[in-house]
Image: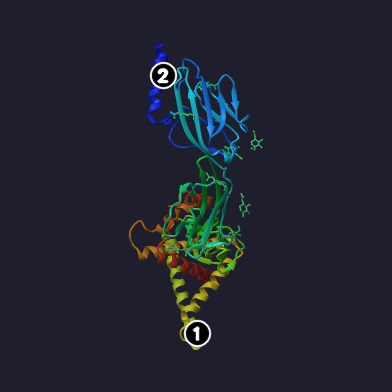
């Protein structure tokens, strides 16, 4: 009896507070068309059952429950009443079910509890779709509109790019209640996956769109050594920023090599060139890379050897001087200012001759001598002790016969690491010149 009085008191307080509004949580109940909602009261089951529970919407009775249940037309299979709490479940919702729902409860002690709540039924969001630009987009040039569309009641639209919320910015503008994103001009970093999320309080849907901004090729670099060992292959790698990925073409001394990979395995002295082409932008960029193939480890020089080399060097110098002299004299008759060019041409033709040489032994011999001559030359120019093999040690990574590929992989993994730095510019030049010198030396042997 005491409990009954207590409940009765509580209910009286509740009822008196604000005409039964406290029976339900604040705000409307949201339902999806075809879905289910519950109007849940905050009543605890009473000690004695309620005498009458009546639910209505817009003045139309849904159910009146006493000893018998009287259910309104259209609700027969759609409702379940919890007689201990007065809560009502409503299924198979239609848009027409939206409205103000009222409940009136008569307790065993003849108290009346009234309450009301609002139901809003939303159409589910379906067929979400983003429409993007039909044409290819080019960085800094094109503009793009992305439009998000769907069927159903939409109350909010959010955009994400690559999983992060997309917000308006320098080149990004929202319009049509966030249905549309205008990007003008598109930047390369605007490439990515765009998602629009459409919501209403009862349902949501997403659509995604992958946008690609084309650019490049640009920022070309070539990774690889400038000096390699004879009999070893070294991988040289052409790297460029391009969307879509560039197609590569390698040239060797101006000739097509038929190699179209980014990586090119090479073993001949000469000038390599990488052409990268973006088929969409139509742009082509090129970069050259020179290589000198040297012998393995220069053997220590014996005094006699050194003397021999000195003689050889002198012979070479004399030969070059004579060659230059005759060349210059000869050509001066024709053209005044072409000495330099002609000398170059002479060097190049001798170089070609060397590479076409059939006997590998002869070739190797020539390279060995070349190395030594070059190192001595180096010595003379920078006479610090311990630098006689500076050139050899500076490209020691290449001394392992099969290390070329590993070397490259190492560089590839550690992208930050620059390729083995080439010897200083003038050393390179000297390499090339020495290459020519070696050819002249061969010629002198043939004499
Ligand atoms: C709408 O969504 C709800 C909840 O996801 C679902 O129960 C209902 O069947 C859907 N209605 C329609 C018409 O598809
Ligand atoms: C009525 O609701 C109460 C409280 O939520 C619950 O414990 C009880 O099982 C429900 N009764 C029925 C018949 O669903
Ligand atoms: C839901 O309601 C629609 C029309 O009001 C009816 O065609 C359908 O059979 C109902 N579904 C259920 C499970 O009651
Ligand atoms: C409670 O609701 C019933 C039926 O809707 C109504 O007759 C009665 O006047 C209401 N009482 C209060 C206190 O609001
Ligand atoms: C989105 O719309 C486009 C064009 O209207 C259509 O081709 C595409 O099939 C649609 N995608 C979806 C998932 O509805
Ligand atoms: C994008 O939409 C705007 C109108 O909102 C229009 O003026 C503009 O031409 C459209 N841009 C493109 C690239 O379609
Ligand atoms: C949902 O859309 C329908 C038809 O477009 C409309 O009649 C109804 O009022 C809308 N409902 C809401 C909650 O916006
Ligand atoms: C686009 O412009 C930015 C700076 O405004 C520049 O860094 C970038 O290289 C440009 N890209 C192209 C493809 O022109
Ligand atoms: C480069 O490799 C080719 C094919 O294996 C070989 O014929 C040629 O002699 C090599 N050249 C040098 C300089 O090692």
**Viewer can see residue 333:** yes
- Which of the pair 33/151 is nearer the observer? 33
Q: Residues within 10 Å of mark 1 (few under 14, many from 20)?
A: some
Q: How many marks?
A: 2
Residue with the most extreme top position: 1
Which circle marks residue 159 in the picture? none
Quadrant position of the C terminus in the picture? bottom right
Residue with the most extreme bottom position: 333
Q: Which residue is mark 1?
A: 331
Instruction: From the image, state whether disc 1 or disc 2 is nearer to you.
Output: 2
- Which of the pair 253/319 is nearer the observer? 253
Is 327 placed above or below 300 here? Answer: below
List x then y, in percent, for residue 216: 51, 62
Residue, x 47% and y 27% (percent of image)? 41
Residue with the most extreme left position: 384
Upstream in sequence: badge 1 or badge 2: 2
List x then y, in percent, for residue 243: 53, 59
**Viewer can see residue 216:** no
Q: Secondary structure at mark 2?
A: helix
List x then y, in percent, for residue 283: 54, 67
232 horizontally vs 420: left or right: right
Q: Residues within 10 Å of mark 2 (few under 14, many from 20)?
A: some
List x then y, in percent, for residue 72: 60, 30
Quadrant position of the N terminus in the picture? top left
The answer to whether mark 1 is within 8 Å of ligand 9 is no
| Whole-number angstrom distance, CA of label 1 to CA of label 2 | 124 Å
- Which of the pair 169/249 is nearer the observer? 169
354 horizontally vs 389: left or right: right
Q: Which residue is mark 2?
A: 8
Is 107 placed above or below 116 here? Answer: above
To which quarter of the image does residue 356 belong? bottom right
């Amino acid at each position: 009896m005491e409990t009954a009085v207590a409940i009765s008191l509580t209910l009286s307080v509740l009822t008196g507070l604000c005409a039964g509004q406290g029976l339900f949580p604040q705000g409307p109940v949201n339902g999806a068309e075809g879905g289910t909602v519950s109007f849940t009261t905050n009543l605890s089951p009473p000690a004695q059952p309620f005498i009458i529970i009546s639910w209505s919407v817009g003045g139309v009775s849904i159910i009146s429950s006493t000893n018998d249940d009287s259910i309104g037309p259209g609700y027969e299979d759609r409702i379940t009443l919890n007689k201990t709490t007065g809560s009502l479940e409503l299924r198979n919702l239609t848009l027409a079910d939206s409205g103000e729902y009222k409940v009136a409860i008569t307790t065993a002690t003849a108290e009346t509890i009234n309450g009301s709540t609002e139901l809003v039924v939303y159409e589910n969001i379906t067929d979400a779709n983003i429409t993007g630009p039909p044409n290819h987009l080019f960085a800094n040039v094109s503009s793009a509109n992305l439009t998000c569309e769907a069927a159903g009641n939409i109350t909010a639209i959010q955009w994400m790019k690559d999983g992060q919320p997309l917000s308006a910015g320098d080149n990004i503008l929202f319009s049509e209640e966030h249905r549309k994103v205008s990007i003008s001009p598109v930047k390369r970093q605007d490439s990515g996956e765009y998602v629009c999320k459409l919501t209403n309080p009862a349902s949501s849907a997403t659509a995604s769109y992958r946008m690609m901004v084309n650019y490049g090729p640009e920022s070309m670099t070539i990774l690889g050594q400038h000096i390699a060992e004879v009999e070893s292959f070294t991988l040289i790698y052409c790297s460029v920023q391009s969307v879509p990925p560039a197609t590569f073409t390698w040239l060797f001394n101006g000739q097509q090599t038929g190699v179209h990979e980014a990586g090119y395995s090479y073993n001949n002295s000469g000038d390599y060139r990488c052409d990268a082409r973006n088929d969409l932008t139509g742009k082509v960029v090129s970069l050259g890379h020179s290589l000198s193939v040297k012998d393995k480890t220069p053997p220590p020089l014996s005094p006699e050897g050194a003397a021999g080399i000195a003689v050889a060097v002198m012979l070479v110098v004399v030969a070059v001087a004579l060659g230059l002299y005759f060349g210059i004299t000869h050509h001066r008759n024709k053209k005044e200012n072409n000495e330099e060019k002609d000398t170059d041409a002479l060097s190049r033709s001798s170089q070609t001759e060397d590479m076409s040489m059939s006997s590998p032994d002869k070739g190797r011999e020539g390279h060995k001598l070349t190395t030594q001559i070059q190192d001595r030359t180096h010595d003379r120019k920078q006479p610090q002790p311990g630098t006689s093999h500076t050139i050899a040690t500076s490209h020691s990574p290449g001394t392992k016969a099969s290390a070329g590929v590993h070397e490259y992989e190492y560089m590839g993994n550690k992208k930050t690491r620059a390729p083995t730095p080439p010897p200083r510019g003038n050393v390179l030049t000297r390499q090339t010149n020495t290459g020519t010198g070696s050819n002249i030396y061969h010629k002198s042997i043939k004499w």
